[in-house]
Image: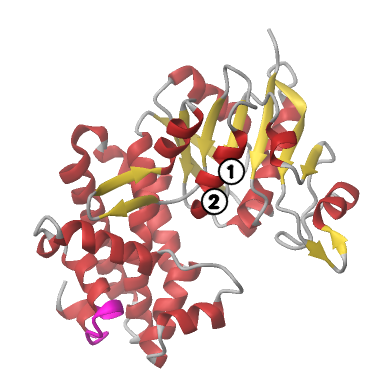
Amino acid sequence: MSLEKVCIIGSGNWGSAIAKIVGTNTAVHTQVFERTVRQWVFQEKVNGENLTDIINREHENVKYLQGVKLPEHVVAIPDIVDACKDATLVVFVVPHQFVRGVCEQMKGHLAPNARAISLIKGLEITSSGTRLFSEEIERLLNIPCAALSGANIADEVAREKFCESTVGCQNIADGQLWHKLFDTHYFRINVIQDHVGVQLCGALKNVVAVGAGFSDGLGFGSNTKAAIIRRGLMEMRKFGQMFFGDMVQTETFFESCGAADLITTCSGGRNRKVGEAYAKTGKPIDVLEKELLNGQKLQGTLTAQEVHEFLAARQLAHEFPLFHTVYRIVYENAPVECITRDI
């Protein structure tokens, strides 16, 4: 049996943490995977030197995951075609706005039996409908695509602090393969068949986290935040049932990708942080994003807008009072105090 050739597309904070896990597991399961892991790294200069050269010499992504060593057989490659050539397992961990562009460049270069997995949290929501990033990858590359999501703060994962994550995969055999690639003693994987629910949770929890940040900024306590989390989880489940029906399973919301990720995101993370600062300062969201996030983008406020447009087009915004209230505070200048009054 030929060995699986693994390629990682993306090399930011989360991509680097995942490269450490994947590289460790290809060295353990040598009967399943080729040892070498090729990682596409967007070429940047760091102190006048190519980032790929630094990674391949120091075995560390000094820009996005400083202080964490990567396995020596994880090889940074700046050319995406070279990185993905003849790969059988492709791990996507790039910002969502780059999915289309990188897939277009990869067309025709993967192995005929290639499979992919998306670690990109969220989904594309417009007034006309929704689209999962796994579906976009499947459409562009004509290969099956699973999804991984969970309560996974990249720095904690990279430093081997115990956590769980969820793989959503329709094909059981592929699910077992992804389990082998990602599962470690500190990064525990559970495989389910609900790939839609896994990705839906990854998007909607960010809206709830903005609301939790508003609560923190107003000085409310743990009871209030718990109420916002509970109501948020209910609206997430309702959204899934209303618009995806049997494709989304209730049990998914109690996986790491659901309740656990929601709790983590509402306790820390960028969406909560900016929501808190907004409640305290009243500064515009885009200003706070620049001041607080070191070049990272805020997902929760954008998703709140997309969800509102989707629901408003169907006259259903009132059915999701928490989502609607977060939208009104951010985009219609409603008082921040609405976060408890109007939900």
- Where's residue 38, x and y in %? 74, 36
**Is 176 left, or right, of 204 in this rendering?**
right
Q: Position of residue 29 (x, y in %)?
A: 71, 23
Disc 1 crowd, CA 10 A, few/some/many (<14, 14-19, 20+): some
Q: What label sits on residue 102 in the rendered view?
A: 1
Q: Is residue 256 left or right of residue 218?
A: right
Q: Answer with the quarter of the image where residue 153 lies.
A: bottom right
Residue 294 lies, in percent from the top left, at 61, 74
C-beta proximity under 8 Å, tags 1 and 2:
yes
Q: Nearer the viewer, residue 8 or 150?
A: 8
Q: Is residue 330 magenta?
A: yes
Could you tell me residue 187's position as x and y percent?
A: 59, 42
Disc number for residue 98: 2
Quarter where residue 264 is shown:
bottom left
For badge 1, the amino acid type reads Val
Badge 1 element: helix
Secondary element at image label 2:
helix
Which residue is at 43% across, 64% downward? 299
Q: What is the magenta segment's predominant secondary structure?
A: loop
Mark 1 → mark 2, Cα distance in angstroms: 6 Å
Kindly identify the residue that appears in the image at 56 percent across and 74 percent down.
Answer: 293
Is the residue 306 above or below the residue 115 in the image? below
Q: Is residue 300 magenta?
A: no
Horizontal side, residue 85 vs residue 234: left or right:
right
